[in-house]
Image (spheres, coloured by chain):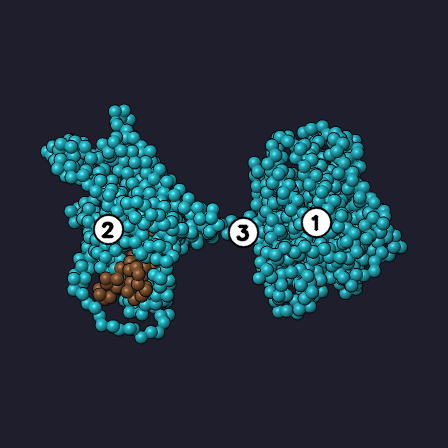
Chain colours: A cyan, B brown
Amino acid sequence: MTLLLLLLLPFAGCVIAACMPAYARNREAWFAALIAFCGLLLTLSLYPAVSSGIVIKHELAWLPMFNLNLILRMDGLAWLFSVLIQGICLLVVLYARYYMSPKDPVPRFFAFLLAFMGAMQGVVISGNLIQLVMFWELTSLTSFLLIGYWHHRADARRGARMAFTVTSIGGLCLLAGVLLLGYIAGSYDLDAVLASADIIRSHQAYLPALVLVALGALTKSAQFPFHFWLPHAMAAPTPVSAYLHSATMVKAGIFLLMRLWPVLAGTPEWTWIIGTAGVCTMLIGAYLAIFQHDLKGLLAYSTISHLGLITCLLGMGTPLAMVAAIFHTLNHAIFKASLFMAVGIIDHESGTRDMRKLSGLSRLMPYTATLAIVASAAMAGVPLLNGFLSKEMFFAQALQVGSNSNWWMSAAAVVMGIFGVAYSMRFISVFFGAKATALPKLPHEPPRWMRFPVELLVLCCLIVGVAPQLSIGVPLQTAAASVLGERLPDYNLAIWHGINAPLVMSVLAFALGILLFKVLKYRFNLLQSAHIPVLYRFNGKQAYESSMLILASSAARLERLFSSRRLQPQLLLLVLAGLFASALMLQAMPDFSPAWSVEHFNLPFALLWLIGCTCAVCAAWQAKYHRLAALMLVGGTGIVTSLTFLWLSAPDLALTQLMVETVTTVLLLLGLRWLPSRISARKMNLVASSRDKLRRSRDLVIAIIAGSVMFVISYFVLLHPANFTISNFFLDNAVPGGGGTNVVNVLLVDFRNFDTLGEITVLSIVALTVYALLRRFRPAPESIGIPAQQANQVDPASRQTPAQQANSGYLLIPGIYLRLLLPVIGISAAYFFMRGHNLPGGGFIAGLVFAVGMIIQYMLAGTVWIESRLKLNPHRWIAVGIGLACFTGLGSLAFGYPFLTTHTAHLTLPVLGELHLPSAFIFDLGVFAVVVGTTMLILVALAHQSVRSHRVPGAPVDNNAITSREIR
Amino acid sequence: MELTIALSIGVLFGSGIWLILRPRSFQVITGLLLLSYAVNLFIFITGRLSVNKPPLIVQGEAVDPSLYADPLPQALVLTAIVIGFATTALYLVVLLGSRGLTGTDHVDGKERDSAE
């Protein structure tokens, strides 16, 4: 339970911190500190259990059937890292309170910081490998946000992107590696994986798994050749650098290698991959650190070098090296965090981090200078400080592992020591010499509590350095034991081991390091050198940038090759893909002997479809130059389809098709006005080019093939014996279950009413979209004027409004009976609606019938006349309809039934007799309202375009133009 | 009858495919209409052909499925028809907007170099 709290606390804190006001710097800092402090206390409270060797586990079921559970697991190693994470977070928060300027948006900072802390905590206490990877990626994400915190700065954005790209690529590799490990071990549970170490090491997938996991760990811990992201991440605020890039996030890779050490280590492959990366990193990092001019840059490369040292120790694969690795991880976190904070203070107080400008700071800020010098002495490995002890252990291991044959191992260790001393010298050189004059600000000591975290950390350096066994001995042993188990070696944390080889190496490193620094400084003008000797060509950033560039440009090239913004090729590909898929399907057709019944040939039916097909083909032929004709022909096909439905026992479909046919035709008629006039090619004496002819022939062939395929499939379906397994259920249950004899309607409003609810929602969305799009509609300039057909000067009707035509003009007689038709159509709609549950009809059909009745009135008398007499408010119809449908659905919830359960009430009324009133009836009423609303909204919005005044672009504004009223 | 309707579906589908491959937006909308007829009919015939057997239950008798047409494809097609209207409307509005913005009714918003 404590573990769960430990994990959730930072995330909860993150949400709260994000909601605090922007100026509340103190409150934010106090709050974040409180969270970190609670976390620290929780961690410390687990110490008695952990130190006695118990592994605390908390398991939450997640996907138990796939054996995937959320497992929180705390052992010695996780405990040590937790203390580091929570403790340093506490100090960093305190420090950030003073470091952040009042102008910075602090809620974002502290929220991200807490989220990062939670993610990191999740990494170290994950007991499931997939869960670990998830938190791992979360640390990448939060670190991206933290590095890019000052997102107005280009270097911050670039650094954040680079760090994120590199670490998340590594994260993906890690995921793959972890999946492989889980596959080999048969479980993702960490304990199970640790238990099957021997199986994993002898499995043939061991090498791929190792490489993938190593890629994840090495990218995260900024190991060669992925080290280049870390210096660029220094664009982050210094508290972030102190926390993420020295103490925690970069240690996640190290942590992972330690965690999986019992499983993966001990093979030559492990030693080669991890060891080589470690050695290269520690040498290159230390070398580059000497030549930095930016204080933070120096610390970044030194961090890379120290991480390389730890990786190298892990690569050695001996138990004692493991102890040294854990010890150095801890030491490095302590002295590096304090150094970063010290640099932050210098930067904050003097306004620059450039070592070429800074000098003589010990006289301006003596206290800070002393702290920084002690910390950098720990970094260099001066005796009586913590860095010395772990470095000695490293030297001893290098000697032991390398022995005589691999003497270069010891040599590399000494070289690293020399470089380390040199860059530490470089670092402390800013405190000596003449007082700097050309600084942006005159430095002075920082506020008391800004220095406090540095003091505390430096004190830790000293305590560990002087009394290692007393201060850190037991926790270190617990942590090492949790990794090594019974292989835990005997070791002695003492300052003085007598004069031995490691001590000689240390002394040598000190002497040569100081010499190197002096030579570089005085002979090679180190302080002003513009570039780094030998390695300056070797630029990871350049490689990264160019690979990103290649990636982007090749993506663009691929897009150009395989994609098109033109519709025709896209549709062509779609059709071809469909044909290909159906070809595959035809191949896989089940073997069946067709139930070859006597072919029912019906002459009238065939003639009907002769008309239908002729209409379709002619429409295809005429759609380019004779749009009106094509529209009528399509309508003909629609009528034939509707008749077919009627013929083939689907009266509901026939009615719906007929009504939809009507509204669709009206819709397209309204649209025709805005299309450009087209004069046929023959009249224009245009001759189609051979390319056009080729394209048309190609399309014709494709169309014929597609049609034939459709014919074959349809015919096969019809010959195949029918299997009515699902439909029988509906037929059997329509009356007892749905209370209606019209099975289609019962299906729509009862059995499948959730479907219908979705459908009417889609309808409403489409109608509102159409309405919204038309509000911004700008017609082409040449179609704004009155169409030629209406501007005819000879026809007197062309000078009348539609209302005049219907009231006294040539439409007088149709006007009278079409108006009389409205109540008739209204009654028909009501009739179709009421009987829908038992006989053909229902909400859809009634809605369409009613909408057609309304449209006839619009067509007759014109928009203006109708709307001055009748406010239809289609939006409200839609709202009421959806509301009714949802209300009916929710009603069943109130009685404890699932959403949209139908209930039938039986009423006996005096005149009407017994009445079945299913709740589906109200649902159907909703459908009706939505159908009326959408149809009217779409058509009326389109019709309004002809009444609206449209301004020709570039023409003067016509103030006298009548603006129509928008439909409300 | 089976042959007739299968052939007709093929013809409607072929005409529709021809039209949606054309360059003018009105041709494409006509093609979509024809395609939706063809597809609706195809879904409908998966319930097989039956004459004079509307799915209206005669009450008071035991339900014999062989006396009724398959109601399930009918219900699916009914909603498909209505949705078809809505998508046609949406496409029409996009078509008109594109025509107004670009000055052409070519589906790509610009005329091809050669006259088509």
Q: Quadrant of residue A527?
A: top right
Please say if the residues under marks 1 and 3 sit with CB atoms less than 8 Å apart: no
**Whole-number angstrom distance, CA of label 2 to CA of label 3:** 61 Å
Q: How many marks?
A: 3
Badge 1: few (under 14), some or many (20 or more) residues near its Cα, within 10 Å?
Answer: some
Question: Going from the N terminus, do you reach mark 2 or mark 3 first?
Answer: 3
Q: Measured along the vertical axis of the image, is residue A316 above or below residue B110?
A: below
Residue type marked 2: Leu
User: Disc number at residue A2?
Assistant: 1
Q: Measured along the vertical axis of the image, is residue A963 above or below residue A769?
A: above
- Name the residue carrying label 2: A658
Chain where mark 3 sits: A
Q: Secondary structure at mark 2?
A: helix
Depth check, front residue: A657 or A384? A657
User: Disc number at residue A547?
Assistant: 3
**Whole-number angstrom distance, CA of label 2 to CA of label 1:** 68 Å
